[in-house]
């Protein structure tokens, strides 16, 4: 795979996993990483119950990101009209609503099956990237193993299943 040179959009789970595995610096050093306000907010949800390596300093997070985008209700409504039967959490919905508004080259990294299904339905299958692949492309091997849903193998298997579920034309 050729290394992506455009914007990398991350959901909350990927931000948490990159911090957990000590991969955040490699990720933001190798890509222009962006997200949405709702994902930043979600990184702070449940903060007290997280282990030390999963606690994220919000000021440091914001400083390390290329941009944090606000999303309007109208943008979320457009997404819901296009994907009425796909239930996304607020961060994922905001991230996809934001992605739909972009005209540049971007890829999105988020392991949730509903989010992947949304990407397939919207015609962005080729823009869905696994965390493992992104880290490999910048030459980073995490000291702590990635959880299964962040690996290339899992990503490819699930995408195949979801493409079949979505039917022909995707």
Image (cartoon, helix red, strand yellow):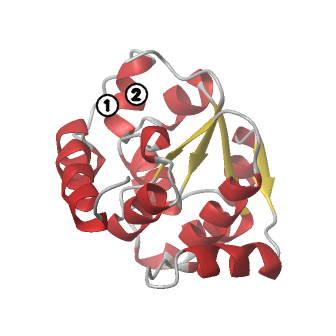
Q: Residue at x 61, y 80 (%)?
A: 80
- Residue 80: give its label: none
CA distance separating discs 2 and 1: 8 Å
Q: What is the secondary structure assignment of the residue under circle 1?
A: loop
Relative side of 77 to 131, left or right:
right
Going by the picture, which residue comes out furthest to the front?
169
Query: Comparing marks 2 and 1, which lies closer to the viewer?
Result: 2
| x then y, percent, for residue 146 | 26, 43
Give above or below for 28 relative to 73. Answer: above
* Disc 1: which residue: 142
Q: What is the secondary structure assignment of the residue under circle 2?
A: helix
Give above or below for 168 relative to 37. Answer: above
Q: Are marks 2 and 1 in contact (CB under 8 Å)?
A: yes
| Number of dots carrying numbers | 2
| x then y, percent, for residue 138 | 45, 18
- Residue 135: give its label: 2
Q: Nearer the viewer, residue 111 or 146?
A: 111
Q: Is residue 154 visible?
A: yes
The image quadrant of residue 57 is bottom right
Q: Earlier in the sequence, mark 2 or mark 1?
A: 2
Give above or below for 136 relative to 150. Answer: above
């Amino acid at each position: 795979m050729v290394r992506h040179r455009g914007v990398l959009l991350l959901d909350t789970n990927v931000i948490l996993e990159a911090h957990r595995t000590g991969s955040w610096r490699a990720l933001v050093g190798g890509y222009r990483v962006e997200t949405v306000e709702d994902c930043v907010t979600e990184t702070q949800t449940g903060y007290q119950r997280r282990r030390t390596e999963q606690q994220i300093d919000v000021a440091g997070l914001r400083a390390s990101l290329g941009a944090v985008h606000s999303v309007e209700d109208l943008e979320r409504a457009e997404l819901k009209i296009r994907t009425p039967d796909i239930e996304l959490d607020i961060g994922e919905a905001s991230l996809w609503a934001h992605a739909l508004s972009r005209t540049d080259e971007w890829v999105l990294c988020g392991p949730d099956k509903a989010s992947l299904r949304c990407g397939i339905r919207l015609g962005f299958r080729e823009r869905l990237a696994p965390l493992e692949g992104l880290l490999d492309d910048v030459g980073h091997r995490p000291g702590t193993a990635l959880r299964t849903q962040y690996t290339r193998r899992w990503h490819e298997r699930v995408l195949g299943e979801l493409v079949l579920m979505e039917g022909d034309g995707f």
